[in-house]
Image (cartoon, rainbow, N blue to C red):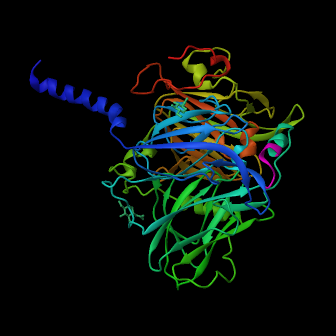
Amino acid sequence: MNQAIITPIFFGILACWSAISVTAEDRYQFFTWEITKGTIFPLGVPQEGILINGQFPGPTIEAITNDNIVVNVINKLDDKFLITWSGIKQRRTSWQDGVLGTNCPIPPNSNWTYKFQVKDQVGTYTYFPSTKIHKAAGGFGGFNIAQRSTIAIPYPAPDGEFTLLVGDWSKTNHKVLRRLLDVGKSLPFPDALLINGVKDNAVFTGEAGKTYKFRVSNVGMATSINFRIQGHSLKLIEVEGAHTLQETYESLDVHVGQSMTVLVTLDKSIGDYYIVASTRFTNPILTTTATLRYSGSNSKASGLLPVGPTDVEWSIKQARTIRLNLTANAARPNPQGSFHYGTIPVLRVLQLANSKSIVNGKLRYAVNGISHINPSTPLKLADWFNIPGIFDLNTIKDFPSSSKSVKLGTSVLGFTLHDFAEIIFQNDENTIQSWHMDGSSFYVVGFGKGKWTPDVRRTYNLVDGITRYTTQVYPNSWTTILVSLDNKGMWNLRSAIWENRYLGQDLYMRVWNNEQSLYTETNVPLNALFCGKAKHLPKL
Ligand SMILES: *[C@@H]1O[C@H](CO)[C@@H](O)[C@H](O)[C@H]1NC(C)=O
Ligand SMILES: *[C@@H]1O[C@H](CO)[C@@H](O)[C@H](O)[C@H]1NC(C)=O
């Protein structure tokens, strides 16, 4: 072999090698989080909250693209506990996803350290407890990822930024709520909406004439919200890591589990203005306010609250305007549009229909007739160590059957690594759905009313559909996504509506190929907890 041939091969190997070892060169951020229960008063009455280092909501993680995040979670609750990182891709490592299908829950009075990289990601995300109904008591927070300084952003740099966690809230103790679900009842209608853990009390202060980034996430359990600011318009710039066409809105719907980022210019006279969040598609409508304060203001916000939309059509219409800016970059310099998702042949079509029913006298929710039950052995551990009898790939089918019957089961859909799939979410319930996928973002290509049929494919947006991790499905409607399954692992696909998820609208996507290689998936972490049938396995 002569030098001319060796050199490119050599550099090829070097490039692959550095793709793996790049983790070692990027910045590390270490966190120690003590999870405790404590008394909180978000609605003026004392109730049991879940605190992180004494805080409710938990601390905001401020990361930069490619940071390595190390979080030692010390569980001081009297319950097992796990946190999941919503929309954080966990490239090649579903081991860090923090859901029952991938991780043993952290027992009381012990700790577990998550280690992951926010590889090639920017944007606004959240984290929250993934098990039981802990999310109803706290333990959630913002997770923001800023661009590296060398990467351009497709909007003028704002003068400051705020993180707003908006969500429905119940005064009822989370254990009481859980008992209701366990005996087969619904959760009560929430008591209020909170913004950053308080009702009508949060204040965000900026300077007149300046522009601020507002990162808004719906951290609630059940209800979509509409967000607006009195007298100010919202310029949408980013949705769960994708840079949008920068349209200006008077108000925006944010469904459960979703995040979006807007720019707001303080272009009115010095004063206080209402920030408003109200519930969508509910009766009654819950409303909460916060304050946008101009520095130097000495007048309280006054006047009528800006009114929100009321109908579903408005929301569907708005959803269709939220599109990908094809020329903008995201975490990497290449334009977001360079993937041309609309030209990629679909290798797999699935239709996931959600339903509600009574099984053995109890309320259950199902997907394609299967109401998911988490086995006590995490699916990922069962898969990795070939533990039989935990799950199979035939329980849940790719399409709903014509029968309305619902069975309990463990739902795992098998995919081949790099499958390009069309997934149609058919919502046959008369309430709004919100589906979240871990491990991969997806293109949202269509929303429509009634039953999906093949001819609605001609209405798909195959050019500039937004990419995100969580999509709404309107009542008695469908939503279609296209997804490139390039992340090997066991990935949770769940309803973000917590009652539905807790009672069975939860499933896993096993993205797999038969080659065992660190290029496609990392090994089981050295500190992995073992439980269920994996409990007595020797540590690696
Ligand atoms: C628990 O925390 C200690 C440090 O306090 C750390 O050394 C250890 O690795 C943690 N355990 C796990 C399983 O992550
Ligand atoms: C799209 O992104 C480009 C940056 O590549 C930016 O200049 C342009 O204003 C953006 N367009 C819209 C409509 O947001």
Does the stretch in magenta take in 173? yes
Q: Is residue 449 above or below residue 92?
A: below
Q: Nearer the viewer, residue 351 or 437?
A: 437
Residue 342, image x and y in percent?
45, 45
Q: Is residue 420 left or right of residue 292?
A: left
Decide if residue 68 is in sight here: yes
| Residue drawn at the location 53% of the way across and 51% of the way down | 125
Decide if residue 309 is in sight here: no
Residue 101, image x and y in percent?
63, 30
Q: Is residue 456 above or below residue 492?
A: below
| Residue drawn at the location 68% of the way across and 36% of the way down | 506
Residue 504, quarter of the rendered image = top right
Span colored in magenta: 171-176
Does the stretch in magenta take in 81? no
Residue 355, image x and y in percent?
76, 41
| Residue drawn at the location 70% of the way across and 24% of the way down | 376
Residue 86, image x and y in percent?
57, 45
| Residue drawn at the location 56% of the way across and 59% of the way down | 320
Q: Is residue 184 above or below residue 360?
A: below
Residue 411, quarter of the rendered image = top right
Residue 300, quarter of the rendered image = bottom right
Q: Is residue 398 left or right of residue 460?
A: right
Q: Nearer the viewer, residue 218 or 283?
A: 218
Instruction: Give the total number of marks visible in the rendering.
Output: 0
Q: Is residue 515 left or right of residue 60?
A: left
The N terminus sits in image quarter: top left
Q: Residue furthest right?
A: 361
Q: Is residue 380 above or below residue 40?
A: above
